[in-house]
Amino acid sequence: MTQVLLDTATPAREDESTSLNHPWVRDLAWLLHAPDIIDSDYPGRPTLEELGLGDASCRKAWLHALDAEPQRLMPYISATPPRRLGHYHERLWHALLDLAPATRLLATNIAIREAGRTLGELDVIYADAQGQPIHLELAIKYYLGLREGPGEERNPARWIGPGCADSLARKHAHTGHHQLPLAHHPLSMARLNALGIDPRSLRQRAAMPGMLFYPWPITIAAPHPARTTATHGNWLTWQDWPILRDNLPPGTLGAPLHKPHWLALPGCETYRSLESLEVELKAHFTGTNAPRQYHLQAPDGSQRRFFIVPDDWPRSLPLPPTYAHHREGFPPC
């Protein structure tokens, strides 16, 4: 096998987190540039310009001011349960939308209930620079593509989470067929009115940053409806690790990424030799079957993220969205 070619170094504009110290602020910097992984019928994440952070020098000053006073983020993030990536990601958005120059946070996690049953939540309502209320649904997803699976080769049901409990097909259907339409339910409109938000003027968006991990070393098609700008990495089984290790550029180092900090790259002090990583991986897979995410970087700055999974991964597959939503009480998609 020829030497594994890693991705070129991250452009400086997207690497603003490296000059920051606090992990929350580093992750905010990552979030500012993270592209959505899929296209949908709704507009995607707010742009830097819409946040009032389109100018690089202003954005840098804003981030460094937060890095100097990270306690300003405490009201938004400090209650995050350990390792809950989704909750952490949501609270980063709460901070971003409330502290960015051109947006204002209006409401979060609005529960919609009927006869004691929760129909769902509206993740975020914020106002743009013109005072327009916007409903934003949030998710951060890391999906691993399967060599074989349901449907044809681009079927999003073939892309599943490392814990095998979720799929791109299921999340895409749930967002478009349940979470966003929920805002038009009469109970939702009543709740918004009670909060002083006019539901008739509400616009909607969906933000889903994350990464798509392709199996290594083979090539498979990108899922539908993945964006061409979606950030990508690779996954491989533990038994294939020695093959990858032996074909990486000499001097390659690696660092583990621990939840909830799967966003920005880890600090330079966390990178270790491949031999050290292998000792850690061997001990890990001796005691558990949980996949592990690593960032590998060569001396020339080229880099890539990898998930290392147990040899029998995946042990199960999520139900296709039609059946999953029917079972959960949602209309078939």
Image (cartoon, helix red, strand yellow):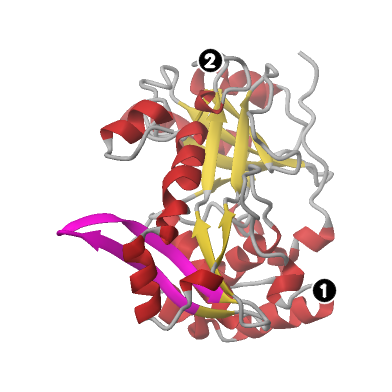
Q: Amino acid at mark 2?
A: Gly
Q: Which residue is mark 2?
A: 151
Task: Please tell me whether residue 311 belongs to the stretch shown in magenta.
Answer: no
At mark 2, the secondary structure is loop
Task: Please tell me whether residue 122 belongs to the stretch shown in magenta.
Answer: yes
Q: Residue at x 80, y 29 (%)?
A: 5
**Residue extending furthest left?**
116
36 vs 314, left or right, is right
Specify whether residue 293 is in view.
yes
At mark 1, the secondary structure is helix
Q: Quadrant of residue 204?
A: bottom right
User: What whole-number distance in Å separates the C-alpha atoms at marks 1 and 2?
Assistant: 44 Å
Relative height, residue 177 to residue 190 (above, below): above
Magenta residues (range): 106-126
46 vs 69, left or right, is right
Q: Amino acid at mark 1?
A: Ala
Q: Residue at x 76, y 71 (%)?
A: 49
- Give whichever of 189, 58 is nearer the camera: 189
Relative height, residue 186 to residue 77 (above, below): above
Q: Quadrant of residue 107?
A: bottom left
For marks 1 and 2, the one nearer the N-term is 1
Pointer 1 local density, CA inside 10 Å: few below 14, some 14–19, many at least 20:
few
Q: Position of residue 200 (x, y in %)?
A: 51, 70
Q: Position of residue 259 (x, y in %)?
A: 45, 52
Mark 1 vs mark 2, foreground winner is 2
Q: Residue at x 15, y 59 (%)?
A: 116
Pointer 2 local density, CA inside 10 Å: few below 14, some 14–19, many at least 20:
few
Q: Residue at x 65, y 49 (%)?
A: 36
Position of the C terminus, as image quadrant, is top left
Q: Which residue is mark 1?
A: 56
Position of the N terminus, as image quadrant, is top right
As drawn, the label of residue 43 is none
